[in-house]
Amino acid sequence: MNDIDLTTHSPEETRELGEAMGKLSQPGDVFLLVGELGTGKTCLTQGIAWGLDIREYTLSPTFVIMREMYGRLPLYHMDLYRLDNIEEIADLGLDDYLYGDGVCVVEWAGKGLSVMPPEHLLVEIAHLPGTVRRFRLLPSGQRYLELLTELGKDFPVTTG
């Protein structure tokens, strides 16, 4: 399995997908989220946090670039929306987090794909009519192939 496509029909289902990802997360995991405004990036991250046993409410870190939360594993929730160029991303010193022992979720990751770890799970999110969202999960690295195999056991998926 190279990648999977799946659809959620509500914010609750999007959080459930995230929760499943969070439960499967291991130290060093990096999830790169790409999608337009309102597609559910933060909603998915809320579920990932829940799956990591983080019970505080997850907000988008748009104005602070990164929020740290702690549960079964640390969660480093980053948002690159306000950054204008690759140099800004590199200058922030996020490598300690991206290559650390926590779980990194990066919203608006498309702005900095070239400076992200080579092994990651790219999550492309598309907004369909109403509250429907289409997720394409593209793994880079064996770890993420294994994660998708496990995730596919709990969610109806289409493989690519």
Image (tube, grey):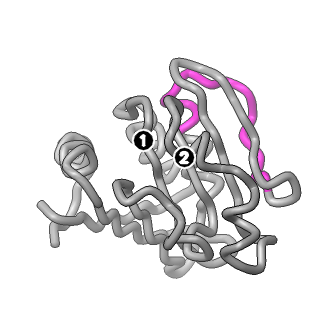
- Quarter location, residue 50: top right
Total tally of numbered discs in the picture = 2
From the viewer's perspective, tell me whether residue 24 is left or right of residue 12.
Answer: left
From the viewer's perspective, tell me whether residue 115 is left or right of residue 61.
Answer: left
Whole-percent x, y for residue 53 in the image:
55, 21
Q: Helix or strand or loop: what does disc 1 sit on? A: loop
Q: Of residues 113 and 8, which is closer to you in this image? A: 113
- Quarter location, residue 153: top left
Whole-percent x, y for residue 114 in the image:
50, 73
**Mark 1–mark 2 distance (CA, rounded to whole Å):** 8 Å
**Looking at the picture, does residue 11 appear above or below residue 153?**
below
Whole-percent x, y for residue 115 in the image:
53, 66
Residue sitting at x 59%, y 71%: 112
Q: Which residue type does callout 1 highlight? A: Asp
Q: Earlier in the sequence, mark 1 or mark 2?
A: 1
From the viewer's perspective, tell me whether residue 141 is left or right of residue 116.
Answer: left
Q: Which residue is mark 2?
A: 98
| Front label number (1 vs 2) | 2
Range of residues picked out in magenta: 48-61
Q: Residues within 10 Å of mark 1 (few under 14, many from 20)?
A: many
Q: Helix or strand or loop: what does disc 2 sit on? A: helix
Q: Which residue is mark 1?
A: 29
Magenta stretch, main secondary structure, is loop
